[in-house]
Image (spheres, rainbow, N blue to C red):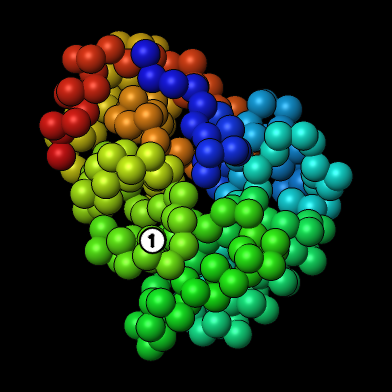
Amino acid sequence: MTPETFTIGGDLEVHRLGFGAMRITGQGIWGEPRDRKSARKVVQHVIELGVDFIDTADAYGPNVSEEILAEALYPYPDGLVIATKGGMERTGPNKWHTNGRPQHLREACEGSLRRLKLDTIDLYQLHAIDDDVPLEDSVGALARLQEEGKIRHVGVSNFKVADIERAREIVDVVTVQDRFNLSDRKYEPVLDYCEAHGIGFIPWRPVEAGTPASREALARIAKKHDATQIQTALAWLLARSPVMLPIPGTSSIEHLEENVAARELTLDAGDVEALNTAH
C-alpha cells in the first residue's frame, strides 16, 4: 500500500497528488487566461477536492499564476503548501530564458512574496540551472534568502544527480522537480536518488504516453479498472515511488476532477510492473 502523504522537509505534510498552476495563464503560458474568473474557480475547486499542494512559478504569465492563486485563495486555508520557483525570464509565449544571477533570484523571490501575500514561501525552487552563472552562486542566493526567513525550504528543478549533490553541499534540498512520465524516464536516476535520500520528486509533464508499448499497456490497464488513461498514468506515478509528488495541471474543472480521482485508483503489482516495463 503506497502512502497517501509525503512530508516535505520534515514538517510540511501534503497529499501526494498536487496541482500545477501553470495552465491557468494564457496561451503559451503567457499573459492573462481567457477568463480570469473561471481560472479562480478552478483554483478554488482544487481546495474543495482536498488538494493541499500547489506548484507555480513567477515565470507563469509571468506573474499571472501567482496573482490568481492569491486572488482565489487568500487568506490561505490551514495546511495548504504553495511552492513557487524563480530563475526563468520570459520574453513572449513559449519563450523561456534562464537567469540564475543572485540579484535576480532575490528580486524574483521578493516579487513572489508580494504577489502571493506571504511572509515566507514554504517551498522555493530554482527553476533551472543558468549555464552562465556558477551553480553555487545561484543556490547560495536561495540559502541566504532562507537564512533571512523568506524561504522555509529549498527545492531545485531540471537538475541531474551530480547537480543535486553540488547543491546539497550548500543548502538542504528537500524536493527536485524534473520531467518524468510513462514515455520519458530520462530522470529515473534522479528519482532513485531522491527516494534513497528522502527527497520529494515532483514530476513535471506527468501525463504523457508516447511510445506504442506504453500506449497499449496504458489502454489495457485503464479498461481493466474502468478508469481513464490519464487517471491510470497518474496512479502509476503514485505507485512508482513513495517520494513521488505529481502535480497535473489544467484550466478545466472537469479535467481537474478527473485528475484528482486518480487518488482512488489502486493498481495491483502486475499493473505496475507492466507499466514499468512498457517503454
What secondary structure is found at the residue carrying circle 1? helix
Q: Position of residue 119 (x, y in %)?
A: 78, 59
> Is residue 40 placed above or below 226 in the rendered structure?
below
Q: Position of residue 266 (x, y in %)?
A: 38, 14
Instruction: Out of 9 and 267, give the one closest to the viewer.
Output: 9
Instruction: Give the class, few, some or many, for how many residues have Cα within 10 Å of label 1's Cα (few <14, many ≥20).
Output: some
Query: Which residue occupies 37% across, 29% down?
Result: 242
> Is residue 19 placed above or below 241 in the rendered structure?
below
- Asked if one can make out residue 223 in the rendered structure from this viewpoint, the answer is no
Check the picture and name the quadrant holding the N terminus.
top left
Quarter-wise, where is residue 2 in the image?
Answer: top left
Query: Where is mark 1, residue-wise?
Result: 168
Check the picture and name the quadrant holding the C terminus.
top left
- Asked if one can make out residue 49 in the rendered structure from this viewpoint, the answer is yes
Q: Residue furthest bottom?
A: 132
Query: Which residue occupies 51% across, 27% down?
Result: 5
